[in-house]
DNA sequence: CCTACCGATCGGTAGG
DNA sequence: CCTACCGATCGGTAGG
């Protein structure tokens, strides 16, 4: 998930960009804003990246891959749907606690991706949703979960998880994990 | 909630702006985009509004007022916390179904408000959250609701309700209302 | 509501 | 990594 191939300076630029994109949004952030915050002249930014959009790609795509990989592992593991849901919650909370700025950008600014990157992103997201819903449906079939509409349940869960980065400074990870798990599983139980 | 004092043309401009702000975000939308969509020259937009920011104000503030007023009525009504929660869900769903574009902008773009308008907006939101949490806490005190942390429960509920505008084209209002109410109340029940 | 236009700022490049 | 700069686009105004 971390771009180990990039130079340290490039990493600083990307992380600073993530903070700015979170604060002001992708469109309202200028390369001049970014340059000022990292202490470079605007044009020098382009020694490390080739465009403003590349910054967004470098922030969003590693997370898309992280969630894709994490989902694959959980989806194919041999545990109950309930345990899988608990693992998915942990997957999201680990991202939120380790990279709160980047994960916010990943959640809120991905729509400014373009072309092939956007297509690839949407593809991964679609697959993620499909597997997530299948886990929920399996839990329902086995009688462990009870709900009417899997799309609505999924949205409630994902919105709650996507909110979690806001709570990073207020709760310890294990504490938030337990609260969210309890609430969501109760909503799904018969 | 609707600006009956504004000219019809101004209303068209504001509603078109809401659609564009939803599609591209406030910052990425230009007055030229807006003018093209309503069929005017860019400068003619300024015959109806005095700045781009006024558009955002005209979209966001009526909803802030709508939710403030709705919350006041529900908060002071003489019914159970559970019934109040059901009414709050309806308050959000009515906005989502009647004005899906504007309510999305209200939810996602309010941070581009500035100065006094931003302060006023945040004040109203703070009060709204306070009352919402008090209703939840009363339900807990009376033994009707069961949960550990009111802030986390509130966030789960509000994120689920804020998502509802995405579902407007997929479900009838009463259907979505029932699904969401059932899920949320189950999450809160003992 | 339009024509014509303004200064500011944008993403990005050339050349060293 | 900087100086110097480019064309495009931005929000907005003057004047009719």
Image (cartoon, coloured by chain):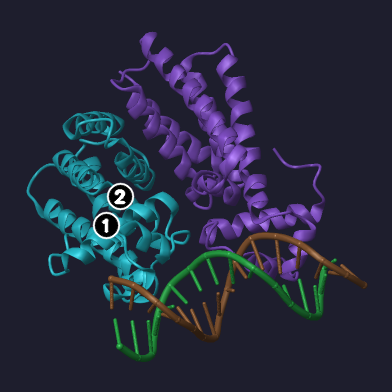
Chain colours: A purple, B cyan, C brown, D green
Relative height, residue A167 to residue A160 (above, below) = below
- Side of D14 relative to B10 (left or right): right
**The N terminus of chain A sits in image quarter:** top right
Task: For residue B127, say whether it is visible.
Answer: no
Question: Given this view, does label 1 or label 2 mark the residue nearer the observer?
Answer: 1
Give the number of callouts: 2
Residue for point 23% across, 32% down: B176
**The C terminus of chain A sits in image quarter:** top left
Relative height, residue B113 to residue A173 (above, below) = below
Task: For residue A26, say whether it is visible.
Answer: yes
Mark 1: give few (<14), some (14-19) or many (20+) Cα within 10 Å.
some
Secondary structure type for disc 1:
helix
- Side of D12 relative to A88 (left or right): left
- Do tag 1 and tag 2 residues touch (Cβ < 8 Å)? yes
Question: Residue B60, percent across and down?
Answer: 29, 61
Q: Which residue is mark 2?
A: B101
- Side of A54 relative to D1 (left or right): left
Sequence-wise first label, 1 or 2: 1
Q: Which residue is mark 1?
A: B15
Question: Residue B104, percent across and down?
Answer: 33, 50
Residue for point 16% across, 59% down: B69
């Amino acid at each position: 998930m971390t771009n180990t191939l990039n130079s340290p300076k490039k990493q600083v630029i990307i992380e600073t960009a993530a903070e700015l994109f979170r604060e002001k949004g992708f469109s309202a952030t200028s390369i001049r804003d970014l340059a000022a915050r990292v202490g470079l002249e605007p044009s020098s930014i382009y020694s490390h990246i080739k465009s403003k959009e590349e910054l967004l790609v470098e922030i969003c795509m590693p997370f898309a891959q992280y969630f894709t990989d994490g989902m694959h592992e959980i989806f194919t593991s041999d545990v109950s749907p309930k345990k899988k849901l608990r693992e998915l919650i942990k997957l999201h909370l680990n991202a939120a606690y380790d990279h709160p700025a980047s994960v916010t950008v990943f959640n809120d600014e991905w729509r400014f991706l373009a072309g092939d990157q956007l297509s690839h992103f949407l593809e991964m997201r679609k697959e993620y949703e499909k597997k997530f819903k299948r886990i929920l449906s399996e839990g329902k079939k086995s009688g462990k979960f009870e709900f009417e509409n899997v799309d609505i349940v999924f949205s409630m869960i994902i919105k709650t998880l996507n909110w979690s980065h806001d709570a990073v400074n207020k709760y310890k990870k294990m504490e938030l994990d337990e609260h969210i798990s309890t609430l969501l599983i109760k909503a799904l139980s018969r």
